[in-house]
Amino acid sequence: MHVENLLVRPLGNGHISLNWRSATENVWSWIFVNGKLAFGPYMAETKNRSVTIPIPTDGTFLVEVHDFEDETVPDSIVQKPLVKPRIGWNCVDNAAAYRIYHTIFDTGSIEPLLLQVPPIGMERMEIDCPVSLEGRNGRWHSFRVETVDQFGNESENEVVLHFAVDLPPSPELTISRDVETGHLTFRIV
């Protein structure tokens, strides 16, 4: 269960205090910072919980707290960039191998061989892209999977396009103080 009533207080020296109220006393809490496990499992045997954790000091950060009734490690819900797609194709009888070609669509370059995969006795094969695709500001990529027979001949399959895009940079918070009035101005850049 994702905790939504989270209070975050800065303590200085690169640490924050997290306070929240769990649904029951007998749950394990897991804390993620920027999508990575920072603390857990944590069992307080009370509904009101509080921990102090270190945080990155070089910019903004995202904190998630999850409560579970057992010690199962949850996954972070932080959004992942679309730069490692899952590549899938239907298997071909008597295939000796499959060759996966990749190119950046808008460069017009010759497709280099990305990976050669041996056949596995299934109807459909799927792999995670073995490289992170260039996705800065969004970019089209193309993939082509060719079936190779025992003599090294390749089939001709259609090209499949994938749009890769990195997440936008984290916003930065700037704080300024008016020296005359003492008022603070908060601005997200």
Image: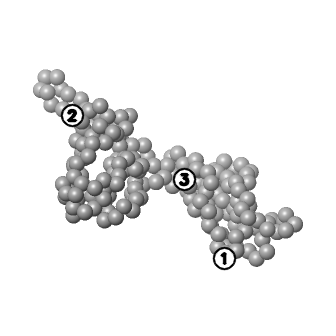
Q: Which residue is the site of mark 3?
A: 83
Q: Which of marks 1 and 2 is in front?
A: 1
Q: Can residue 16 be seen in this view?
A: yes
Whole-percent x, y for residue 107 in the image:
66, 48
Q: Find out whether the residues at labels 3 and 2 contact each other: C-beta distance under 8 Å.
A: no
The residue at the point 59 percent across, 54 percent down is 140
Dot 1 alpha-carbon crowd within 10 angstroms: few under 14, some 14 to 19, many 20 or more: few
Element at badge 1?
Answer: loop
The residue at the point 67 percent across, 52 percent down is 103
- Which label number is shown at residue 123? 1
Element at badge 3?
Answer: loop
Q: Can residue 189 be seen in this view?
A: no
Tell me how many marks there are: 3
Whole-percent x, y for residue 88 in the image:
62, 67
Which residue ends up furthest to the top in the rendered image? 179
**Horizontal placement of 149 versus 7: left or right?**
right
The N terminus is located in which quarter? bottom left
Element at badge 2?
Answer: strand
Q: Which kind of residue does numbered mark 2 sit on?
A: Thr
N-terminal label among 3 and 1: 3
Q: Which of marks 3 and 2 is in front?
A: 3
Q: In which quarter of the image is residue 73?
A: bottom left
Q: Find out whether the residues at labels 3 and 1 contact each other: C-beta distance under 8 Å.
A: no
Q: Which kind of residue does numbered mark 1 sit on?
A: Glu
Dot 3 alpha-carbon crowd within 10 angstroms: few under 14, some 14 to 19, many 20 or more: many
- Which label number is shown at residue 185? 2
